[in-house]
Image (spheres, rainbow, N blue to C red):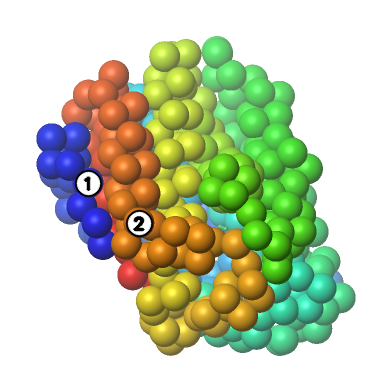
Amino acid sequence: MAKPSKQTASPSKDINACLARWTGLVNDALDRYLPQPNCAPAALHRAMRYSLFAGGKRLRPALCLAAAEACGGQIENAIPLACAVECVHTYSLIHDDLPAMDNDDFRRGRPTCHKVFGEAVAILAGDALLTQAFEIVALAKAQPRYSHGDMVLELARAAGSRELVGGQVADLQAEGRKISTAELKRIHQRKTAALIRCSLRLGGMSVNCSPAALDALTEFGTNVGLAFQVIDDILDVTQSSQQLGKTAGKDQAAEKATYPAIVGLEKSRQIAARLTNRAFESLRPLGSRADLLRALGELMLRRDR
Ligand code: GRG
């Protein structure tokens, strides 16, 4: 993978150990927030848990917690928000895998939700996870600068028709069509970067961050989110299904617009590195407190799944 410039990247802590610890905290909290698997209707709750605890990388929750830390706050405040964004993310994956959309049989290393529970329950499990996310935001602690309303608005906008859902529609409509890199970037902004940026902003809001810190997180989130999707497109071409835990090579088969398809692999790697460097630049005002965010940015650029 292409390298970001040394001067801005300073992953000083053991990011993998930190990620493992944070994943544990988020998983425990999600387990508490979600209805138990035997709670009626059991099929629905089992389906929600099946996808939520399928071994996702938990990058959005990690970004949320690291943002709270970068703003000098306690990660405990950010845990509910980290859980909420992961519920929205998992819902979007369940729906994206449905036959009416990407029609995928394999996700997070196991059969997709609709393959195991049927289409109707999978649709409803996605709906319930989306709703669950807002219930969890309501249970978070409001802050002097940020009310519950501000947090709900943040998540609703990122998940709604102008961002995540709108990006998915634009992505489906671009299939089989030749589009420019500018149009592709706009799709990536909505379907991928919006929720990543929202994860960071909610992390900052959960610890009452300053407006300047929120701006820094916003800029970081946009660029790291765009880089994340470019890498995702590269991995779809270069990795095996087993490595990815989802079906590889689907973009080409569906004639999807991707950076590798439009500009080639090498240029795509350069674009991802450039976006990551730009993301690091925006963290300067946060100083060394943002080291974990820098390390996460590095990890996202260099990931192999
Ligand atoms: C159906 C409303 C709706 C939206 C779907 C999420 C999405 C939009 C489509 C899925 C395919 C895709 C390329 C999404 C972009 C975001 C992305 C790269 C998701 C995968 O995120 P990871 O790698 O997944 O963090 P894990 O499983 O590790 O959580």
- Whether residue 147 appears in this view of the structure is yes
Q: Position of residue 222 (x, y in %)?
A: 48, 37
Q: SS at mark 1?
A: loop
Q: SS at mark 2?
A: helix
Distance CA(mark 1)–CA(mark 2): 14 Å
Q: Horizontal placement of 230 versus 37: left or right?
A: left
Classify 10 Å Cα crowding around label 1: few (below 14), some (14-19), many (20 and above): many
* Quarter of the displayed picture in which ligand 1 can be seen: bottom right
Q: Determine the residue positioned at 26% across, 24% down.
A: 284
Quarter of the image containing the N terminus? bottom left
Query: Answer yes or no: do the residues labelled 1 and 2 have beta carbons within 8 Å?
Result: no
* Residue 88 - label: none
Q: Determine the residue positioned at 47% across, 45% down.
A: 225
Give the residue pinned by disc 2.
Answer: 267
Q: Horizontal placement of 18 versus 237: left or right?
A: left
Q: Determine the residue positioned at 78% across, 78% down.
A: 99
The amino acid pointed to by label 1 is Pro
Answer with the quarter of the image where residue 123 lies.
Answer: bottom right
* Residue 4 - label: 1
The amino acid pointed to by label 2 is Lys
Relative to 285, residue 80 above or below: below
Relative to 200, residue 169 above or below: below
Q: Horizontal placement of 270 versus 199: left or right?
A: left
Q: Nearer the viewer, residue 82 or 173?
A: 173
Q: Position of residue 62 (x, y in %)?
A: 40, 49
Answer with the quarter of the image where residue 194 lies.
Answer: top right
